[in-house]
Image (cartoon, helix red, strand yellow):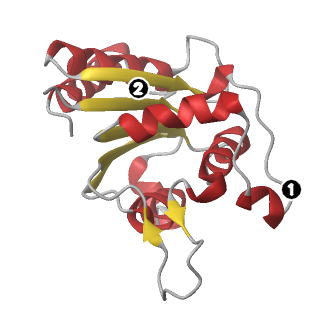
Amino acid sequence: MAKHICVLNGHPDPSEDRFVHALSRSYAKGAELAGYSVETIDIGGIALEPLGSAADFETPPDSRIQEEREKIARADHIMFAFPLWLGSMPAKTRAFIEQTARGGFYLDTSDKEKSWPKKMMAGKSARVIVTMGMPAIAYKLLFDSGALKAVERGLLGISGFKPVRHTVYGGVDAVSADKRATWLDDVRRLGAGAQ
C-alpha cells in the first residue's frame, strides 16, 4: 500500500508567487512521482481565527477544519512549510494549528489520571521547512531557531511524530533564480523519499 503524505502549505498569503507555495508543490510532485498518495492543505485559502479560550480548545472544530485535519489523520508523513515572520510562524498559520488541535486531535488530554497525555500522532513522521529573509545561520545563532524548535518539540514531537526532520532556507528574497531552482530540486527529492 502506498504511503499517504499530507503537504501542509503554511503560507498565509494565497498568492501563487510565494516561495513556500513553490516548495510545497515541488515536495508534492516528488512524492506523487514516487507513487505516494498526496493530499494538500493550503492555509492561505482557509478563513481562520485564533482560539479565544481554553473552553474553545476542548471542543471539536467546525466541519471545515475537521475536513482539513482528516488529511493529517490519514497521512503517514506530513511536510509542513511556513515562512518566518517576526521570528515565528505567521499568526494565521498558528491559528490553523490551534484550530486543528481542538478536541484532543494531536494530544489527548482527556484522561486526567495519566501523568502524560496520549500522543495521537504516534507512527507518523514529519518534515518542517522554514523560509526566511535573514541568512539561515543568523536564525540559528541569533534566534536559536526558536520557531522551528517550538514546532518540532511543542507540536510535532510531543504529539508523537517521529522522526521529525527540518530544512531551513534563508535569504530567500536575495538568492538567484538558479539557487531557488536547486532548492526546489532538493525538496522534490525529499518528497520522493517521503523525508
The residue under label 2 is 175
Mark 1: which amino acid?
A: Gly
**Total numbered labels placed on residues in the image:** 2
Q: Is residue 170 visible?
A: no
Marks 2/1 in contact by CB < 8 Å: the verdict is no
Picture coordinates of residue 151, whole percent (x, y): 49, 57
Tag nearer the camera, 2 or 1: 1
The quarter of the displayed image where residue 23 is located: top left
Picture coordinates of residue 56, whole percent (x, y): 80, 56
The residue under label 1 is 52
Q: Is residue 57 left or right of residue 195?
A: right
**At numbered mark 2, what does the secondary structure look like: helix, strand or loop?**
loop
Measured Cα–Cα span from mark 2 to mark 1: 39 Å
Please say if 6 is above or below 15: below
Picture coordinates of residue 42, whole percent (x, y): 56, 23
Look at the image and tell me in which quarter the C terminus lies: top left
194 or 12, nearer to the observer: 194
**At numbered mark 1, what does the secondary structure look like: helix, strand or loop?**
loop
Lower sequence index among marks 2 and 1: 1
Mark 2: which amino acid?
A: Val
Picture coordinates of residue 158, whole percent (x, y): 43, 68
Which residue is rendered at x = 55% and y = 19% of the image? 18
Determine which of the numbered discs, if any, sits on residue 25 in the image. Answer: none
Please say if 182 is above or below 4: above
Which residue is rendered at x = 71% and y = 39% of the image? 92
